[in-house]
Structure formats: C-alpha cells, structure tokens
Image (cartoon, rainbow, N blue to C red):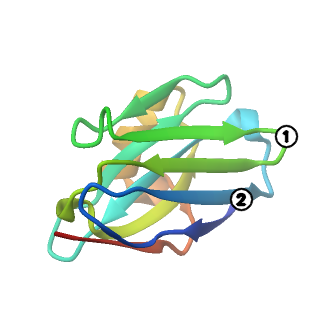
C-alpha cells in the first residue's frame, strides 16, 4: 500500500512562497496519480493539484498560476511550490495518491471521494496578511 510522508510547510506572509515535499513508497508509481489536497477549519476539502506519472497536471482554479506541482520519479518525491500565497491558502496540506486515470479525475477524487485516497499525515501551512 502507498505510504506518503510530507515535509515543508510552515508560516509565510501574504505574497510569500513555501515549498512542500512528499516522499512516496510502497507502490508502483505509474499505477497512481499523485497530488495534494488541503483542509482548512470549517471549509470543504479541496483538491489543489495532481500529476500523472508522465507529468500531466491539473490544478484547482483557486491556485492556478500560483502553485506548481512537480515530481522526481527517480526519488519517488512529489513537490508543491506555492507562490504569491494568500491568507485563504491557510490549511493543512496532504499528499495523496489514488488510482484515477487522469490528473483531472484524481483532483476530483481527492476533493469528493476521500475514501479512495491514500494520504500522508499532513503539514500545516499558515499565511498571514
């Protein structure tokens, strides 16, 4: 079964940047789409970004142009570069894997069907104004 462990996160001011990393293990990478979702208090879970094994990506509208998902398949590591951060980006960010066929589908699964996700423990991102 996939095992995922996030690092990075922390605090930043609005307009700043942060980078999240996730080391994945225990599964055949090409069989899963990897990505990030976030959960803020009293807000709905939101799939943020997803990436297929071949590098195809999908992003939530709320982060397009600001966040970049990438991967190093040789290191089984997933990244999320977050730029131009806003206070509304404050949330716990989770690395996730699911067996969706495309990054678009994976984003939807992360948001609406968490029971189909493997996920890490999460890392806090706090953005102050």
Q: Which residue is mark 1?
A: 74
Q: Is residue 127 above or below residue 58?
A: below
Seen from the viewer's position, the closer of residues 42 and 63 is 63
Residue 2 visible to an observer of this rendering: no
Distance from Cα at disc 2 to Cα at disc 1: 11 Å
Q: Which residue is mark 2?
A: 23
Determine whether, in the image, residue 76 is placed left or right of residue 123: right
The residue lying toward the viewer, choosing from 27 and 124, is: 124
Circles 2 and 1: CB distance less than 8 Å? Answer: no
Q: Residue at x 61, y 25 (%)?
A: 55
The mark nearer the N terminus, 2 or 1, is 2
Residue at image position (23%, 35%) is: 61
Residue 42: percent from left, percent from top: 14, 74
**Against 103, is 69 above or below?**
below
Which residue appears at 59% of the width and 49% of the height? 79
Most foreground residue, 119 or 56? 56
């Amino acid at each position: 079964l996939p095992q995922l462990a996030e690092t990075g996160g922390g605090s930043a001011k609005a307009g700043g940047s942060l980078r999240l990393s996730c080391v994945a293990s225990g599964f055949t990478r090409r069989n899963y789409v990897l990505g990030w979702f976030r959960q803020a208090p009293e807000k709905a879970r939101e799939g943020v970004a997803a990436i297929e094994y071949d590098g195809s990506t999908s992003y939530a509208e709320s982060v397009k142009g600001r966040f970049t998902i990438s991967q190093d398949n040789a290191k089984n590591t997933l990244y999320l570069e977050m730029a131009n951060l806003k206070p509304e980006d404050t949330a716990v960010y989770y690395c996730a894997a699911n067996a969706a066929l495309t990054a678009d589908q994976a984003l939807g699964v992360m948001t609406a069907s968490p029971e189909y996700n493997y996920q890490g423990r999460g890392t806090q991102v706090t953005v102050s104004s």
